[in-house]
Amino acid sequence: MIDFSILFDHMDMYLEGFWNTLQASLLALVGSFALGTLFAIFRISPIRPLKWIATAYVEFVRNIPLILVVFLFFVGLPAMGIVLEPFIAGTLGLTVYTAAFIAETIRAGILAIPKGQTEAARSSGLTYGQTMRYIILPQAIKVVIPPMGNQFINLVKNSSVLGVIAGLDLMYFGDLIAADTFVTFDVYIFVAVFYLILTLPLSAFVSYLERRLAGSR
Amino acid sequence: MDFIGAYAPSHLTFLLEGFWVTLQVAFLSIVLSFSIAIIVGVLRYAKIPGVSQVLGTIVELVRNLPLLLIIFFTYFALPEVGIKLDKFWAAVLALVIFEAAMLSEIVRSGLNSVEKGQIEAARSSGLNYVQTLWHVVLPQALRRMVPPIVSQFISLLKDTSLAVVIALPELMNHAQIINGRNVNYVIPTFLMVAVMYFVVNYALSVVSKRLENKHA
């Protein structure tokens, strides 16, 4: 039987971890969305050097493990004399990593709109900016929203890496409680429930959006 | 930063030894999780009352959990209920549980993408349900699944690095050991590790893109 006293006795730790996981996820979401949009624009821009930089960044980061990126911020920066709080280092690592995936999602969304539409809009007298604003982006957003939601779910799950570098998140406090009580099995079940409280509604919302938007296109 | 010291031959071979373990874990996990994913995906597609719902719920729960939690679970929590695995198999089991859930979702949506008319046509031309699935639906679905499956394999290879938390002697663990010897090795070692992961994963993604263009 699962021992619920483990949950109630350590509720403050679970909640603090839960709150920090939520904070790290939201901060990394905002940061990676801004950075990712920037790189997506760079990648489709006609300016060659910007395109190269963005492509190199996206391709490189997407193909290396998240924990390596986080370690670079947590162990790599101190080796160069810059020491960050674990929470900050972890959130930065998460942001830099997720930005590559978000850039790719946005780019794919824009590329999914047939070229003919841009040509038609341009030849009917709209400027490039107007074409983007009135024709391409409104359609691209519909394509992009569901995969973006999936990226956010991944982000919440990935934030657990903060636990490895003492980032005070849910995973970290889970390990502390497990080490404290020796009731590892039950503790991890409760940690799982806390993660599911965040991720399950999100993924239900994403599949709802997928169904809605599939019909409207 | 000491590139010359960090890239001493003994360090490079040590990293490659770690990478070999990484590749072993990844390969085993891919084979096992893909086999399970096909069975789970087909069972869910076949809409067997009860079975599909139970599997669907399990898949949904596992997909929404962090892999790191599952690794801690298989290594630290399972012994408590009498299942004791060494680091290697605890890591493989965790990866298989997590990736099988992710892959089964790909298999299921691949199967669903095959037009219903084809199934009806196959059935009315005399094939039974299993034959229809085996000869008509699966071959087409598998072809459409190739790109997302390859990206899932890339994720899996990257995810093996999380086993560093249970001190599995894979690439990340060996990098940390080298880093522990001299702080000036940290950046060069991480760079080398990044390049190793990148080379294999990028090659995989190029192959996937080729296949995608061929089948499109």
Image (spheres, rainbow, N blue to C red):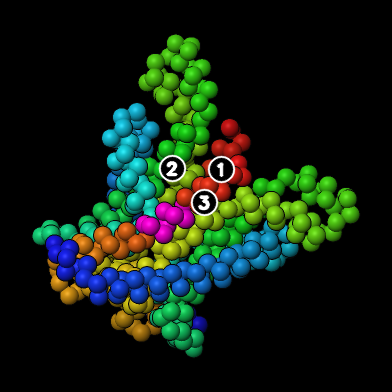
Q: Which of the two marks, 1 or 2, is nearer to us in this view?
A: 1
Residue closer to the observer: B197 or A4: B197
Q: What stretch is highlighted in magenta?
A: B198-205
Find disc 2 in the rendering and name its residue.
A105
Q: Which residue is drawn at 53% across and 60% down?
A: B102
Q: Position of residue A114 (x, y in %)?
A: 53, 28
Q: Is residue A124 visible?
A: yes
Q: Residue furthest left?
A: A81
In the rendered image, which quarter contains the C terminus of chain A? top right
Residue linked to disc 1: B213
Dot 3 amino acid type: Ser
For marks 1 and 3, the one nearer the N-term is 3
What mark, if any, has residue B61 been given in the picture?
A: none
Subunit under mark 1:
B
Q: Please check the rendered image and state whether residue B209 is part of the magenta-colored stretch, yes or no.
A: no
Amino acid under label 2? Thr
Q: Magenta stretch mostly in which secondary structure?
A: helix
Q: Most extreme residue toward the bottom, as rendered? A: B82
As measured in the structure, the alpha-carbon distance from the residue carrying label 1 to the one carrying label 3 is 9 Å
**Residue that mark 3 sits on:** B208
Q: Position of residue A7 (x, y in %)?
A: 39, 74
Query: The residue under label 1 is which amino acid type?
Result: Asn
Horizontally, residue A75 falls left or right of residue A10, namely left
- Badge 3 marks a residue whose secondary structure is helix
Q: Are marks 2 and 3 in contact (CB under 8 Å)?
A: no
Q: Which residue is drawn at 44% across and 29% down?
A: A137
Question: Residue sitting at 73 percent across and 53 percent down?
Answer: B137
Q: Which of B76 and A116 is in front in this view?
A: A116
Separation of marks 1 and 2 at Cα, in angstroms: 19 Å
Q: Dots 1 and 2: beta carbons under 8 Å? A: no
Q: How crowded is mark 2: few (under 14 residues within 10 Å), some or many (20 or more)?
A: many
